[in-house]
Amino acid sequence: MKKRTYNNPVGVGKYTGLLLITPFIAGFLLFTLYPFAASFLLGLTDYDGVHPPQFIGFENYRELLADSELHDAALVTIKYTLILVPLKLIISLFAAMLLNLEVKGIGIYRTAFYVPSILGANLAVVIMWQFLFTSGGLVNQLIGLTGADAVSWYGDSRYALVTIILLRLWEFGSAMVLFLNALRDVPKEYYDAAKVDGCGGVRSFFAITLPMLKNVIFLNLVLQTIAAMQEFNAPYMLTGGGPMRSTYTIGMMIYNEMFRYHDAGTANAVSWLLFLCITAAVLILFRLTGRNREDSI
Amino acid sequence: MKDKLLKLAAFCCAVTLSACGGRTNKTVTAPDGKLDPCTIRFSWWGGDDRHEATLEAIKLWNSRHPEIVITPEYGGWDGWTEKTAAQIGGGTAPDIMQINYDWLVTLSPDGKGFYDLDRLADQLDLSGFDEDVLSFGRVDGLLNAVTVSVCGRGPFYNSQTYESLGASFPETWDDLLALGETMRGSDKYPIDLDIQSGFTAWYLSVVYIQQKTGRNLITMDGELGFTVEDIEAALDFYKSLEDSHAVRTVKEHTDQDGNSALYQSSEFISGRVAGVLEWGSSVGKYEMVLPEGALKAGPLLADENGNNSGWMIKPSLLYAISANTEHPDEAAAFMDFMLNDSECAEILGTTRGIPSSEYAEKSLENSEKLAGLVLENHEMLEAADTVTISPYMELDRMKEFYNTAIEKVSYGTEDTHTAAQEMYDAMSSYLEKIRK
């Protein structure tokens, strides 16, 4: 059989492809791989950012494993992730289903639901959260109307983490967009056929919608887990990690070690521990959900 | 192939570690005694009063030296240390920086972290400074920074709240405790203490113990001066302030203000919290949020015999030049302008405290701008038997130890004895590590 040949009207040479991806490769080497390798090496040093780093092997890791600060931060991070991620997936899926309805002006609603995700935990949002959750804030005023006692949102270590979780739940837009996109790909005929067979809304949801969204649910689960385990901004801005370290995440610990305590060795070692934890969490998620995903359409 | 990969890995390791330590190897630009056209960056932290005055001063400089453009970088105190440390670590520090006293320990432990200002005598006139004041900025004999002003914390009160309650400012520790009980009925507080970056809760407790024992918390060379018993007594004292309603508990404070600074808190602005423990050089931001003239300096709290020793002073802030600057002469000339120039001094007023430069102080005197809360606080501290704060006291890790202990005592999760022992152990081991 004669080998097919193609014309090359724009003169693409042998190395053109390589040349075209060079900016990405350079960026990846410089801004991802280099910091990644440097971070690991710095984690093996005693480095204050002023004197040259001194190689100390795994001493930072040995000290960290016995450090109560890391234990506290790890517990908070795990608790935060375990509460936030499932709630966020449920809320974003629910919102996506609502926004998938054919209603007049749905584009405006979709935009409005997505806006909080763009805002992030910036200063304006933090001020709004202060206004909502401080002791005389709007939320407590509303609670007061019901006759119930005001809640100590920031001062009580049981509730402080809740304010941060609520902030991140409010920012469900990115997960919602993925769900919405997947929902729009589900053929309507499936629902019509189910309806003819006498299948109700709830049954359709569990028998059609959820199975069809398996891959997107998994994708969101992984993305949201990674983001939650890296949480820094919201507790830093809202609570400073308090009270009693109840909102002190591993992300905050890395920041403190690096920029407040000038201990770059420890900060990088914690970063690598976090990286290993995230990798482990993602592998577990793959293992737990792998079989189901293989079945998906 | 395996050999090549190993060589490549070894090369990468060497490059990485050498890049990490590279900042200290950079050649320092030598002064040439001339002022060339350039752009230099100047950074500072502060409140709005300081920002506005400094921007005005920069305008004046630019009108006199249009060829040397000053780019301002400024913001609030929270996060400023971290930002500057990152800039210095990354070799992108501004040419001139307003620095805090403890940064000399952390960022220039060998005196080479900042430019040696003695080399810039052609542009920087330091004849208006006492040698004692200049010595605050010397590290290993090298002049790393120049003290802008010397100041200390003192109590400032909202006189309108006090007048409305018919109360007078406390003069002794007992007065403060009694005042708390008096204000309990009206749900107001005579003063506020916190566990934020200013660590005022621990600061006031330290003053109390230093006054009582004559021992300093930390010596100038970083030795712990307090015993476990002293720390326990300080924590007991703090708890007594909370119990007597002299200050809000940590929980109330956090609930009401969240993570906001006190001068941004509605509790302070409304007058419910009627006092603050603040540096004389920074009190302007509290003054600005209250009705004009409402904030007044209170006496330094004393024991029943009138002994008001134990209060602390330090260089409120210093100016330093980056070791990496490419424009040392121009940076020094601008620093000289900020420190000594009479017109500039009048613009800046007391937004950075009472100037340590004799020339700037004279200008303020002549223009009758040496007045107000800063001066009152300054005079009170000058009249008292003060203690110079050790630069080790304000290190962030140390603040974490103080605030953790105060928080545990306030929330009742630990008794003062246990919290004191933990704090003592943590401080001892950290100081030993950092002194090396």
Image (cartoon, rainbow, N blue to C red):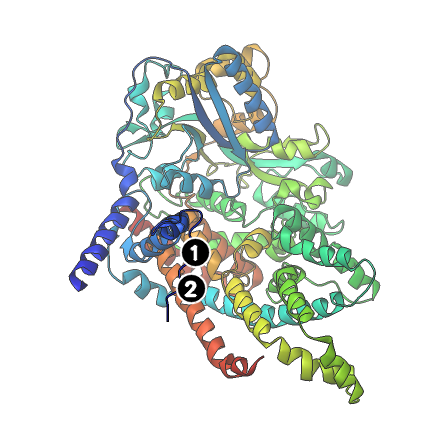
Which residue is at 62% across, 43% downward? B262
User: Sequence order check: which comes first, mark 1 or mark 2?
Assistant: 1
Front-lying residue, B387 or A124 = A124
Q: Chain of mark 1?
A: A
Say above or below: B336 vs A217.
above
Give the quadrant of the N terminus of chain A: bottom left
Say above or below: B373 vs A157.
above
Residue B75 appears at what percent x and percent y? 55, 35
Numbered circle sitting on residue A274? 2
Residue A68 appears at what percent x and percent y? 42, 65
Q: For the residue marked with disc 1, what is the amino acid?
A: Ile
Cα gap from disc 1 to disc 2, whole angstroms: 9 Å
- Quarter of the figure with residue A197: bottom right
Task: Report whether A9 appears left or right of A202.
Answer: left
Numbered circle sitting on residue A254? 1
Which residue is at 28% across, 44% downward? B19
Task: Report whether A144 appears left or right of A79.
Answer: right
Q: For the residue marked with disc 2, what is the amino acid?
A: Leu
Say above or below: B387 vs B147.
below
**Can residue A66 be seen in the rendering of this structure?**
no
Give the quadrant of the C terminus of chain A: bottom right
Task: Report whether A151 appears left or right of B14.
Answer: right
Front-lying residue, B93 or A180 = A180
Mark 1 residue element: helix
Residue lying furthest left: B3
Q: Chain of mark 2?
A: A
